[in-house]
Amino acid sequence: MKAILVRAITFFTARLRFRPVILVLQKLNQFPFVYRAARFFDPNYIRKIRPFRYQPAVAQINWQGTRLLVDLNDHIGFQSFIRNEPFEMTVYTMAQNLGLSGGDVILDIGANIGTASIPICRERGCELAAVEASKDTAAQLLRNISLNDVKAHVDVIALGSSSGVGGFLKLHLRDGNRGASSLHEDWSTSVGVDTFEWVPCQSLDDYVARSPFADRIKLIKIDVEGAELDVLRSGRTFLSRNTAPILLEYRIDAGEKTRKMLHQVLDDLDDSYEVHALDEAGNKHPFDRDTAYANVLFERRTKDARP
């Protein structure tokens, strides 16, 4: 009965996603009923119930001096617009906690449209090294970088150990949540037919070795939808000398395959990094490998810190 009701609701919300309706949801989002109702209009919610036909619908949010172009027909853009703030604030709070400033580089692997890293780079004058595989998403990322006068190095590539097919890999696109697009075909699948695009690939070691900022990286964020382990293993040389903390999602509740992959990340990094759970304010807490967290922080161990 519940499944039938949800399908009926999304049948209507998928057809009522006009800009004026979404604007009302934004204006009244502080009311609990409206906040709960808004999730039924989220493209990410709809795509899991019924096919979601994607057409771009760009709007702008203004948050503490940062201007961001967001797509109302995509999960990250929709949530950013409804809340009128950047979708992901962990990079922002961590960079503040670390005291990053001009000349410091934030390496954002899986940068999407820049909501995670552009606000703090604009505010603090940090340089952004953005890696984004999707060409369509990277185009919006570039617009947001330009809109905020951020110094940025942008590479439209996928990082990993595979050489792909002639140097290219398939990126499986998830309409309704392009942030869930993945090199893994079975990652966060949607109802209906998903498409893909060919993206060039290289290892993290090669990427860093060719960069002009390798010794200035002060914070690393990796959000690559199931390919985190492969990215890290493709950067063993870089990680052997890296001192920058690493931010990573730790959603072991996403499925057994994800759980195994993230546990392997822990095992791979255990000798060199200490891991902490993070709350929404960026505060560190004790970490439990069998608990799901929105984000965890890997910090380089000092030579005498290994238990």
Image (cartoon, grey):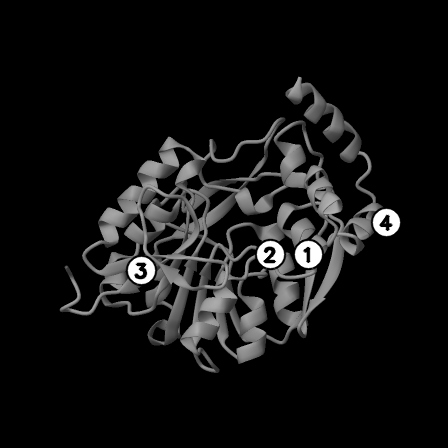
> Looking at the image, which residue sits at the far bottom?
102
Q: Which residue is mark 3?
A: 205
Cβ–Cβ below 8 Å for labels 3 and 2? no
Looking at the rendered structure, the kind of residue marked 4 is Pro
Cβ–Cβ below 8 Å for labels 1 and 4? no
Labels in figure, total: 4
Q: Which of the two residues, 150 or 249, is positioned nearer the viewer here?
A: 249
How many residues crowd mark 1 within 10 Å: few (<14), some (14–19), many (20+)? some
Residue drawn at (44%, 73%) of the image: 97
Q: Secondary structure at mark 2?
A: loop
Looking at the rendered structure, the kind of residue marked 3 is Asp
Instruction: Locate the N terminus by quadrant.
Output: top right
Q: Where is residue 138 shown, x and y percent of the image?
A: 58, 56
Cβ–Cβ below 8 Å for labels 4 and 2? no
Q: Secondary structure at mark 1?
A: helix
Q: Is residue 51 above or below residue 122?
A: above
Taking the image as shown, residue 230 lies to the left or right of residue 24, namely left
Q: Which of the two residues, 130 or 196, is positioned nearer the viewer here?
A: 130
Q: Nearer the viewer, mark 4 or mark 3?
A: 4
Quote the CA–CA distance across marks 1 and 3.
37 Å
Residue drawn at (53%, 43%) of the image: 180
Quote the CA–CA distance across marks 4 and 2.
21 Å
Q: Which residue is mark 2?
A: 87
How many residues crowd mark 2 within 10 Å: few (<14), some (14–19), many (20+)? some
Q: Where is residue 139 shown, x and y percent of the image?
A: 63, 58
Cβ–Cβ below 8 Å for labels 1 and 2? yes
Q: Earlier in the sequence, mark 1 or mark 3?
A: 1
Q: Which residue is mark 1?
A: 83
Q: Which of the two residues, 179 or 29, is positioned nearer the viewer here?
A: 29
Q: Is residue 155 above or below residue 201?
A: below
